């Protein structure tokens, strides 16, 4: 059960906030009192998330920010817009944006490899760096950066060499960021979900999803809300 007002007066940035785990994170943060900057490359999806967020606390303000986090130019502009909107940097950042381009290793193209690494690794790096820089520049005494990994980055998965490599890289990036940013009071952690029912997994063939579900004690995929 959500802790009421635990995040009151906090500003949270969530990438991939237009759907799946990212949307569920936005909803949880809003329920706990945070203002949420919902970031997604799909502006319509980000706006849909914003419209569904609770606004029970005075001063709670949720705003959609369309951005391609794989572009440093977009991330730089994004941070400027967030600071202009809220007059402060986010003290919480959740990097949930990610893509898949699944194919067996022997058929995997350079384009599919680059596309996944660009969003999942470079995008996570750019947001982590930008938020950390903004917090340090503001003189904030604390902050929390949470990067979304995957169980696939730990154990691998058929047809996902590029995705598995990207999520293993996210974990290594986050461990290093944690060591470097601790002196500024900024905590960095990776969350490693198992197989969760999201628009991303909806594109996976049913027989593969059934195999995933069979590996879970409850016999089903996880829910983004954590239920």
Image (cartoon, rainbow, N blue to C red):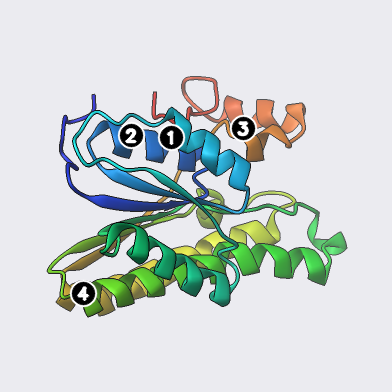
Position of the C terminus, as image quadrant, is: top left
- Per the model, the C-alpha gap separating discs 3 and 4 is 44 Å
Q: Nearer the viewer, residue 221 or 59?
A: 59
Is residue 145 left or right of 65 when viewed as pictured? left
Check the image and report above or below for 83 versus 35.
below
Task: Provide residue 20's location: percent of width, then percent of height.
Answer: 53, 37
- The residue to which callout 2 is attached is 28
Question: Given contact means CB atoms under 8 Å apart, are the residues at marks 1 and 2 in contact?
Answer: yes
- Please give the name of the residue rendered at 64% of the width and 35% of the height, measured from the top-left corner: 199
Question: Is the C-beta separation of discs 3 and 2 under 8 Å?
Answer: no
- The front one of 213 and 69 is 69
- How many other residues sit within 10 Å of disc 4, few (<14), some (14-19) or many (≥20)? few
Asked if the residue at tag 1 contacts the one at tag 3, i.e. Cβ–Cβ closer than 8 Å, the answer is no
- Near mark 1 (Cα within 10 A), the count class, few <14, some 14-19 or many ≥20, is some
* Label 3 vs label 2, nearer the camera: 2
Question: Which residue is label 1 attached to?
Answer: 24
Query: Which circle, 1 or 4, is nearer the viewer?
Result: 4
- Name which residue lies at 46% across and 32% down: 51
Q: Position of residue 59 (x, y in %)?
A: 22, 42
Labelled disc at residue 200: none
Asked if disc 3 and disc 4 are in contact, CB closer than 8 Å, the reply is: no
Q: Nearer the viewer, residue 193 or 136?
A: 136
Label 3 residue SS: helix
Q: Which residue is mark 4?
A: 138
Judged from the image, the secondary structure of the residue bearing numbered disc 4 is: helix
| Residue for badge 3 | 212
Q: Secondary structure at mark 2?
A: helix
Residue 32 appears at what percent x and percent y? 23, 35
Earlier in the chain: of badge 3 and badge 4, it is 4
């Amino acid at each position: 059960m959500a802790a009421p007002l635990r995040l009151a007066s906090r500003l949270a940035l969530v990438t991939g906030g237009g759907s799946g785990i990212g949307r569920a994170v936005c909803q949880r943060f809003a329920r706990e009192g945070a203002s949420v900057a919902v970031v997604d490359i799909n502006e319509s999806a980000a706006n849909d998330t914003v419209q569904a967020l609770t606004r029970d606390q005075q001063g709670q303000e949720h705003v959609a920010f369309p951005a391609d986090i794989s572009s440093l130019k977009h991330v730089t502009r994004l941070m400027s817009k967030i600071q202009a909107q809220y007059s402060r940097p986010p003290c919480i950042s959740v990097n949930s944006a990610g893509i898949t381009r699944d194919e067996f290793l022997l058929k995997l193209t350079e384009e599919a490899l680059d596309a996944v690494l660009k969003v999942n690794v470079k995008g996570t790096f750019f947001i982590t760096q930008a938020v950390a820089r903004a917090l340090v520049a503001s003189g904030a005494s604390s902050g929390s950066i949470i990067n979304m990994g995957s169980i696939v980055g730990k154990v691998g998965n058929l047809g996902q060499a590029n995705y598995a490599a990207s999520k293993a890289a996210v974990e290594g990036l986050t461990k290093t960021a944690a060591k470097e940013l601790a002196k500024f009071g900024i905590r960095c952690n990776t969350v490693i979900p198992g197989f969760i029912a999201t628009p991303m997994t909806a594109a996976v063939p049913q027989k593969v999803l059934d195999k995933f579900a069979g590996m879970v004690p409850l016999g089903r995929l996880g829910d983004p809300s954590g239920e």
